[in-house]
Each structure stands twice: as structure tokens, then as C-alpha cells.
Image (tube, grey):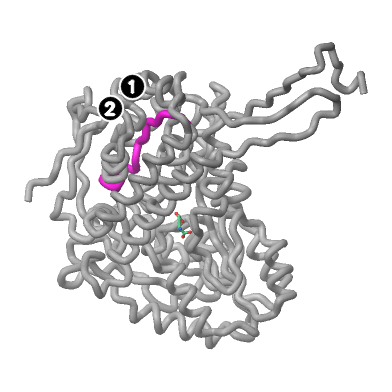
Amino acid sequence: MEARVYKNFIGGEFVESSTGKTFERRNPADTREVVGVFQDSGADDVHAAVAAAKAAYPAWSQVPAPRRGEILLKAAEIIQSRKDRYSQDLTREMGKPLFEAGGDIVEAIGMAQYAGSEGRRMHGVTTPSELPNKFQMSIRQPIGVVGLITPWNFPMAIASWKMLPAIVCGNTVVIKPGEDASISTYNLVECLVEAGLPPGVVNIVTGYGPGAGQPLVEHPDVPVISFTGSTDTGRLVYELGARQIKRVSLEMGGKNPLIVMPDADLDLVMEGVVWAAFGTTGQRCTATSRLIVHKDVAGPLVERIVARAQSLRVGDGLQAETEMGPLVNEKQMKRVLGYIELGQQEGATMRCGGGRLTEGALANGHFIQPTVFTGVRPSMRIAREEIFGPVLSVIEVGSLDEAIAVANDVAYGLSASIYTRDINAAMRAMLALQAGIVYINAPTIGAEIHLPFGGVKATGNGHREAGPTMMDVFSEWKSVYIDYSGSLQRAQIDL
Ligand code: UN1
């Protein structure tokens, strides 16, 4: 089958890039298959998309928010009706197994429902004045054209986290999806357009960071940038945005700890760790990458985890029995294999995995074995740096205090977890863990869209996606004072 050529989507039209260049995306489970051909866009394409978004803004920002929300609610139904097809597309483009791809789509449906309903709330604040005959309130207003740079690992969910709150607030959008998984963004936008989204409200420009991402971040008509990706790239986005005093929202790396106390249910822990360390092939910002376990239960727990990791069925995500898919691309595979090499050099013990899988049908994909290191010290690089692959570092500790100290002793702070049946330990950890998301008796993945998502320290810059906080990035507060006393009342003075 000939792969579809995806053109940029600008002002409601599909247009070729002015660079004249395209790039192919291949299925990471079988690189002989081209899943799509995309525009390798440059600054001129970004400028055209921003111009289209700017032209659409005055009318869109005037559409009453409940009407904007209705389009999202309708889009939710359309996405739902195509869930199977979109899941297949998502698995083909980035590799996660079909059941997980379905979760990615469901997260976008949830966000479309949540953001759509927000069109009828979008609450402001009213407070009493300190003066008589004076009324005051604060309202949200849209900002303008927002620039979105999204990752490949949750290609529909994360695009929806950014795009849907942005448009329900009345902004218009230019999105540059991750070059490894752009199809899901087209699928999401196709549903919005069918649901009635006017031309120019959402524009898609595909390509790479330097060619297409950077001109978007630097464009003077784009006052808001929302980015999810690596901390290195995020820092660059932040610096470029700061020069123009832009609002920049960053979601970046993680090195998420899962603490296990001796009273935990070890079978439950094993299931949680295997799901959160090896699900999505470890390619979640929220993946469990450090198992911080009390030494009294480390032996039996590691045995269970290793046994299960070795039995995980690694393969093409399109096959129903597959539990773990490939890594997204060759570069990422080499990077992860490099960390596995490094772990051994650093003196950790590799208990299972460690290699590439190339037998039979796996020969043409980026498959590696689920890997567990024990004897990891908190100072090792495999305990400190984000690997973004199926590699778990096990660190033994002697107490809850030590566990929390080790958990917090990294640059990142996205998600963290503790397994214990002791309510006092759980409460202490909940408050002391430096993370934007904490789980108790559940692993570090599995956030739902109606609570704030984001992290502390090098993971983020103080913003939160999703939840009631999602609109803060995409709206501006305006405080309004109405004095109906008929005389000048000086605040703080005429009391
Ligand atoms: C990510 O980790 O990159 O919380 C996003 C989760 C998903 C989203 C993950 N709902 O695991």
C-alpha cells in the first residue's frame, strides 16, 4: 500500500511545504513499512500557519465559549467512533501495543469531554469590595495564537491536552507534532473539523525542531508556547521565549521513583512495577525508572519482577498478544543500549535483559529486552538520568526516611509512588516526595485528565496541564472594578 502523503494543514487547506522537502516515517516494529510521508517544513510554512491562525482569531475568540465547547463535545463522539482505526494508526506510527494506543485515544476523548464542558464553566472570581457601592470580578480572556510542540509518546493524548483547552478558551493554534508520530494529530484535528471547527483555528505544520519548531517559538505573533519533550530542548524553548517575554509552559523529563516498604503486598508491587517500568517500552515521562526498595523485601521482590520481565511478550504492537512494543526509533534504541552498557560499567548488576531482540519477525524493528539492574547506587548515572526505555534501576534502602531522601535526590520531579499498608508512612511520603504527582499503592503512571499534570524541579516551570489548571496557560485574567457610588472612592485610603 502506498503511504499517504500528509500536507501541512493551514487555514483549512492541505498545502505542501514551501521547502519542497518531505520526510518518511517508518513503522518502528518493521521499518520496511512507511506509515506516512510528511512535509519537512521551514520558517515560511510556520509564518503562513501563524498568519492563518491570526486571521481566524478575531472571529473565533468572539464565539461564545459554550458554543466552542459544543464543537469539542461533538468531536469527542467522532473520535470515539473511530477509536479502533486511530489506535491502529497510533501503533503503526510509534509502536505502543494496540491496547495502550486505545488508552491514548481514550485520554483524548476524555479531554475533549472535559475541555468541551469547560465552555459552560470557565469560572471567574467575584469578591466583595472593601468600599461600598463597588463591584469587582475577574474574568478569563483568550490570548491569541498559541504554538504547541508535542511529543511522539502520547501523540493523541498530549496533543489534546494542549490543543483543546487552548481552543475552548478562544485562542487559535499552530501545532508542530513530534516528527515520529504526526498522524495522530491529523486524526484529532480531522474530528474537530468535522465537528465544525472553523478554518484557521487549528493549523498543523510538520517537521523537525530546528526547521519548524524554532520558527514557531520565535514568531512574534505567537505569545504562548506549550512544549512537552526533553529538558535540553525545553531549556532552549524557554530561553528563546524569554527574549520576547512569552508565556512558555514546559513539561519535561522524569526519573520517577517507586518506593516499596516491607509491609507492602509484593505481588501487587510486582504487577505495578512491570506495568510502569516496561509499559510503553518505558517511554513515558511518568515511567517508573527507579525502584527504591526496603532491603528486607528487596530479594523476593526483585525475583518476582525479573521473572515477569523475562516472560513479557515483546513484539509488534499490532499483534494482540504483544505486551511491549519497540522503541520509537533507531537513535532512541542506541541511546537506551548505551545506558545499559553504562550501567554495567558503573558496577550495577544486570539481572535480566540488556540486549536487542532480532529474532524472526523482530529483525526489522527497534526491539530490546526489558532490563533490570540491581545494586544501583543513587550516585550512578543510571539512577539519575532519564533513559526513556525499558530499564529499571533497583536501589536498596533501610528506612522510609532514606527512601524519601533517595527519591528526592535527582534533578527531576514528575511522578512518585509508595507501596505500603502503613497509613502513617503513606501520608509522610505523600507530603515529602518532591513530585507533581504522587501515587499510593499504585505505580507512577496512570494520571487522569481532570487533575493537574506536571512536575517540579527540572521537570517543569510551574505550569500544569489538564485539570482545572489547564486554562491558566491559555487564558489571561482580567480584573474588573465597577464603582457605582457616583463619587471618587480611593482604594486603601477612603475606608
Ligand atoms: C507521559 O508520561 O508522557 O499518566 C504522559 C500517564 C498517562 C500520560 C503519560 N496518562 O501515564
Mark seen at residue 52: 1
Circle 2 sits on which residue?
10
Q: Where the C terminus falls, by quadrant?
A: top right
Q: Is residue 264 above or below residue 493?
A: below
Residue lying at 46% horizontally and 78% vertically, measured from the top left: 271
Q: Is residue 186 above or below residue 266?
A: above
Q: Is residue 30 above or below residue 372?
A: above
Relative to residue 323, is residue 463 drawn left or right? right
Relative to residue 169, is residue 398 drawn left or right? right
Relative to residue 36, is residue 295 drawn left or right? right
- Out of 52 and 44, give the one closest to the viewer: 52
Q: Position of residue 90 (x, y in %)?
A: 27, 54
- Out of 336 and 239, give the one closest to the viewer: 239
Q: Is ligand 1 within 8 Å of the beta carbon of the residue shown at mark 2?
A: no
Q: Amino acid at mark 2?
A: Ile
Q: Point out the tag, 2 or 1, that comes first from the N-terminus.
A: 2
Q: Secondary structure at mark 1?
A: helix
Q: Which residues are magenta?
A: 170-184
Quadrant of res 131: top right
Residue 369 covered by magenta stretch: no
- Out of 423 and 402, give the one closest to the viewer: 423
Residue lying at 46% horizontally and 85% vertically, measured from the top left: 304
Q: Say whether marks 2 and 1 touch (CB < 8 Å).
A: yes
